[in-house]
Amino acid sequence: MAENLNLFTSTQEVIHEALNKLGYDEAMYELLKEPLRMLTVRIPVKMDDGTTKVFTGYRAQHNDAVGPTKGGVRFHPMVSEEEVKALSMWMTLKCGIVDLPYGGGKGGVICDPREMSMGEIERLSRGYVRAISQVVGPTKDIPAPDVFTNAQIMAWMMDEYSRMDEFNSPGFITGKPIVLGGSQGRDRATAEGVTIVIEEAAKKRNIDIKGARVVIQGFGNAGSFLAKFMSDLGAKVIGISDAHGALHDPNGLDIDYLLDRRDSFGTVTTLFENTISNKELLELDCDILVPAAIENQITADNAHQIKANIVVEAANGPTTAEATKILTERGILLVPDVLASAGGVTVSYFEWVQNNMGYYWTEEEVREKLYSKMIAAFENVYTTAQNRNINMRLAAYMVGVRRTAEASRFRGWV
Ligand SMILES: NC(=O)C1=CN([C@@H]2O[C@H](COP(=O)(O)OP(=O)(O)OC[C@H]3O[C@@H](n4cnc5c(N)ncnc54)[C@H](O)[C@@H]3O)[C@@H](O)[C@H]2O)C=CC1
Ligand SMILES: O=C(O)CCC(=O)C(=O)O
């Protein structure tokens, strides 16, 4: 039978299992099996050559029983309605795991910003915000960066929103430049959270980070900061990749050099002749493997070839359900996306809190607060997995979904 690569239906299955284990009935699953709201928008954009191109975008709001919905916006050619729905459900789980007063949301636009000018990207960003303006806002749904979106795009989106709203609303969006109300540390937060989780997972497996061989797929916001943090901790980053290929050096790559040469879309391998494929990269002999790019990278096809002792998912959805089973059976410790990559939304929450207060924290304060959230989340999920003898993904779903289910029940929705 062909493997299920559909992110939405495979997420539904794990949510179902988690709710069953928590003792909820079918009505709760019916409520949480898809977003409460899904908006599809068409965005006309004047292109530089004088033509008008109409883009399709989405905003999904999974559940707002706990609080406003929260989640990034992705600009990518492979964006689809089902992907955005799944991503919004994962955001509910992440916010539950790190205990933030939010439900999950997510947005995306089908486009390839790598082939657009800055002016075209700005007009698309502003058009997207106008199109979704009725359903978002600082107390309703708060966007943030994700794949191929960044602080500049957040700034344009905030500017467009403040033109429609009567007062300046920095809390409408997070991941902004610092001068526009961004938080210290948001740019590196996802990788910092992944680093904390790697350190904890390594302790469980008696692996010393100093000298550990690390492979990272993806060299964008998550992957590149992570490579830097790992190499600063004394690990040997022996492989990295981007959409075009991968670099491998068993003695360790020069991360500072690669960071210096990468472009704003996280591309660096095109500058080198001796590259390997992303498939080869994932199968390298290493201690810690971190998929930090896109979905469905570790599947039933290659799960038996993964040689790492620990796999930590910095990307959303890089490992299929079937591959999760295979890795678990093989004794590989798999730290799931909804836990490992929760550092980004955690510091986004800190940014929103600071915007609401109008009072800003130092980088050190942000780092300490992130550290305590991530450590508590890791321990909670790890202990749940151990106590119930289940894999870390199912444990994370149980921890993550519980608060939204409880809040929905107290509100009398189910
Ligand atoms: N930026 C953030 O704060 C957060 C990001 N994530 C997840 O981390 C992953 C990466 O996101 P970012 O680093 O923000 O994106 P990014 O846009 O900064 O970088 C993406 C990287 O993935 C590479 N890539 C794209 N397509 C690829 C392919 N087919 N094969 C191999 N590599 C490919 C790109 O070349 C680039 O190096 C995504 O799954 C995202 O949802 C999760 C939580 C927060
Ligand atoms: O920073 C945020 O609010 C959301 C980040 C995000 O989209 C994610 O964790 O996948």
Image (tube, grey):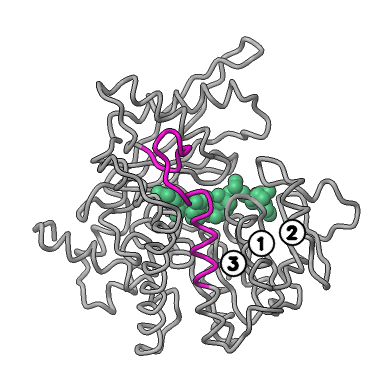
Instruction: Residue at 27% x, 38% y: name it.
Output: 138
Residue range corresponding to the magenta coloring: 173-197
In terms of sequence position, does the residue under pointer 3 or pointer 1 come before the other? Answer: 3
> Callout 1, which amino acid?
Ala
The span from disc 2 to disc 1 (Cα, nearest Å) is 7 Å
**Outermost top residue:** 50
Find residue 255 and name its label: 2
Residue 402, percent from left and from top:
25, 69
Identify the residue at horizontal 62%, vertical 35% (top origin): 112
Residue 371: in sight, yes or no? Answer: yes
Q: Which of marks 3 and 2 is nearer the N terminus?
A: 3
Q: What secondary structure is marked by label 3?
A: loop
Q: What element carries label 1?
A: helix
Name the amino acid type tagged 3.
Answer: Ala
Q: Name the residue under label 1.
A: 227
The local crowd at label 3, few if under 14, some if 14 to 19, many if 20 or more residues have their Cα within 10 Å, is few
